[in-house]
Image (cartoon, grey):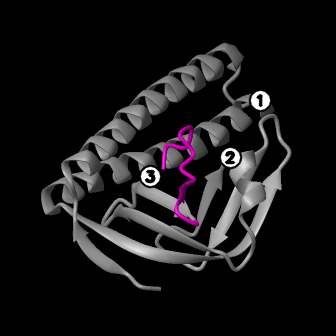
Amino acid sequence: MNQIEAPITDQDIKTIKRKVEKTKIFLFVFLFFIILWSWGLCDSDSYFTILNIFILVFDTIVLIVFAYALKRLRVTKKDLKAKIKIVDTFKVIDKYYTQRRNSSYIIIFDSKDIPKYEVTKRNYGLINVNDTIEIEYSKFAFWVLKIEHNKNDIENKQNLQ
């Protein structure tokens, strides 16, 4: 809506670096467990069992997601060099929640840069369709630096975004 470029502050840089470290740790642990899981399931007697094919396809998908995450980490270097953030206001166009092992509460924005964001259950109940969300994010890797609804911080600290 009102996209404005602003200089990144020292606090913003600390926030980006903290999120990058959390992402690196998550990726390392996730990849480690996927490798152990795959190795434990593989049947060493036959390379072309249905289970081995499933594991190969699953591991390929995981590697694609992993490569995307690594690309985002590389793009972060541009953010730290340029020291520019975007300050904008997004309109909530939809919201939903999933009921998997851990419920996820998602709000959908009218933005191509950050199309959705996972919020806490408490904040999900306070946000309605057509509400506006004030957001600050890094220009190139789209790290969320600040996100507010009616001047209240709605950042999900568990979210690596």
Q: In whole angstroms, how far apart are the C-alphas of marks 1 and 3?
A: 26 Å
Q: What amino acid does circle 2 point to?
A: Thr
Residue of label 2: 120
Q: Secondary structure at mark 2?
A: loop
Q: In whole angstroms, how far apart are the C-alphas of marks 2 and 1?
A: 37 Å
Residue 123 drawn above or below residue 134: above
Q: What amino acid does circle 1 point to?
A: Leu
Q: Position of residue 22 (x, y in %)?
A: 42, 33
In which quarter of the view is residue 8 placed? bottom left
Circle nearer the N terminus (2, 3)? 3
Residue 112 in view (yes/no) = no
Q: Position of residue 136 (x, y in %)?
A: 39, 64
- Asked if residue 5 lies in the magenta stretch, the reply is no
Majority secondary structure in the magenta region:
loop
Q: Secondary structure at mark 3?
A: helix
Image check: 134 left or right of 6?
right
- Which residue appears at 56% of the width and 38% of the height? 158
Q: Residue lying at the far left in this picture: please name it.
A: 81
Q: Given this view, does label 1 or label 3 mark the residue nearer the observer?
A: 3
Q: In whole angstroms, how far apart are the C-alphas of marks 2 and 3?
A: 25 Å
Image check: 84 left or right of 134?
left
Q: Which residues are magenta?
A: 150-161
Task: Give the camera-side residue of 46 and 106.
Answer: 106
Q: Position of residue 140 (x, y in %)?
A: 31, 65
Residue of label 1: 51
